[in-house]
Amino acid sequence: MERVYNFSAGPSMLPEEVLKKAAIEMSNYEGCGMSVMEMSHRSAVYEKIINDAEKLLREVMSIPDNYKVLFLQGGASTQFAAVPLNLLSERGKADYILSGQFSSKAYQEAQKYGDVAVAANTTDINFSAVPSEDNLTFREGIDYVHMCFNNTIYGTKFPYIPKTSAPIVADMSSCILSEPIDVSKFGVIYAGAQKNMSAAGLTVVIIREDLLGKARACTPTMLNYKVMADNGSMYNTPPTYCIYIAKLVYEWILSLGGLQKMQERNARKAALLYDYLDGQNYYIAPVEKSSRSMMNVTFLTGNPDLDKQFVAQATGRGLVNLKGHRSVGGMRASIYNAMPYEGVEKLVAFMKEFAAKNPK
């Protein structure tokens, strides 16, 4: 069977070039006689892999020297607890911007640890847009602001970085590496790797050094950023193979010209799909144009039965994992870095065909 076009929101497709290189090196990495899966994380061979991965990520994202890069486990959801435990002082407070399911979950988790308030909330419109900058309300003296930069489920993204003197903590799980960002504008960036960076099992945290060493005494060792930073992400056995795959992805991005070229590629793919949606009247695009994600595109027919037929027939054409999240319904095309332009072309062609054959 030929490879399909995988529009899954995550775990998502990886670049074919990365998969082919990993396949070549699977049983014998660079002549060492074993797979990366088998080698000790304390070995000289593996230490070079993880060190190279960090160097490459720093190069790809232009990460300043006063930021630490941590390769962790537990998914982005574990960071919902790690962030307040490391940054929220005993009598401190933090403000959360609620723009989707994951930012809401992060807010609920943080409430266990202190004075946490909502700076803005778009629940009333089913998160079909991110809060406007004018509607953000931050309190004085907060320890940090938390936001989810791209909302995978709803297909929205912040077109701006909030203005605040407090450190900004951003969940970038579904948009990291899709375009250049100014890391210095953030105190902490965290991301599950299974959408745009690697296989499931790795979480990357990028943290400004002055924010380390503030963890509460009750913070589990495995969630303490300073412990992980002091031990080079190897306090325990890290997700070794996922870090190796991430290294290959970073190399792939650099081979294509870096994040500026990646943004151009992604913008072209997104424009193809959004331009079609905007020029027809069969499918509904629920997200406000000013909040549209370049990574996750949601659409629906307005008829649940037709939506089911669309997903089933698309699967038969090799266009898989297009079913939308239950919170939104309809369809969702996740067009991360590894999705080729041809995949979006085939999706749009199928959308036109389906609309012509299934009048509402």
Image (cartoon, rainbow, N blue to C red):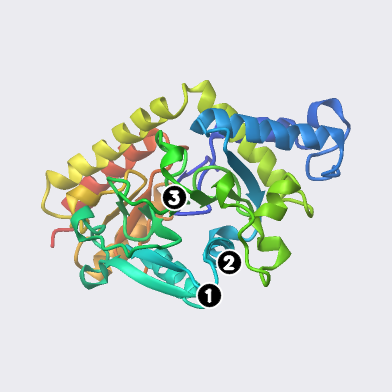
Q: Are marks 1 and 3 in contact (CB under 8 Å)?
A: no
210 vs 110, nearest the viewer:
210
Picture quadrant of residue 358: bottom left
Separation (CA) of disc 2 from disc 1: 7 Å
Most extreme residue toward the bottom is 112
Q: Position of residue 206 (x, y in %)?
A: 55, 45
116 vs 191, nearest the viewer:
116
Q: Position of residue 312 (x, y in %)?
A: 37, 60
Mark 1 is surrounded, within 10 Å at the Cα level, by few (under 14), some (14 to 19) or many (20 or more) other residues, namely some
Q: Position of residue 147 (x, y in %)?
A: 39, 57
Q: Looking at the image, is mark 2 or mark 1 earlier in the sequence?
A: 2
Q: Residue at the location (61% across, 42% down)?
A: 68
Question: Does residue 188 lie above or below 344 as drawn?
Answer: below
Question: At label 3, which amino acid type do we have?
Answer: Ser
Q: Looking at the image, is mark 1 or mark 3 earlier in the sequence?
A: 1
- Which-is-in-front pick, marks 1 and 3? 1
Q: Which residue is mark 3?
A: 174
Q: Residue at the location (61% across, 48% down)?
A: 199
Q: Looking at the image, is mark 2 or mark 3 earlier in the sequence?
A: 2
Q: Are marks 2 and 1 in contact (CB under 8 Å)?
A: yes
Question: Does residue 184 lie above or below 239 as drawn?
Answer: above
Q: Residue at the location (40% across, 54% down)?
A: 166
Q: Which mark is residue 113?
A: 1
Residue 193: tell me if it is visible: no
Separation (CA) of disc 2 from disc 3: 24 Å
Picture quadrant of residue 23: top right
Q: Which residue is mark 2?
A: 85
Drawn side of residue 92 relative to residue 297, left or right: right
- Which-is-in-front pick, marks 2 and 3? 2
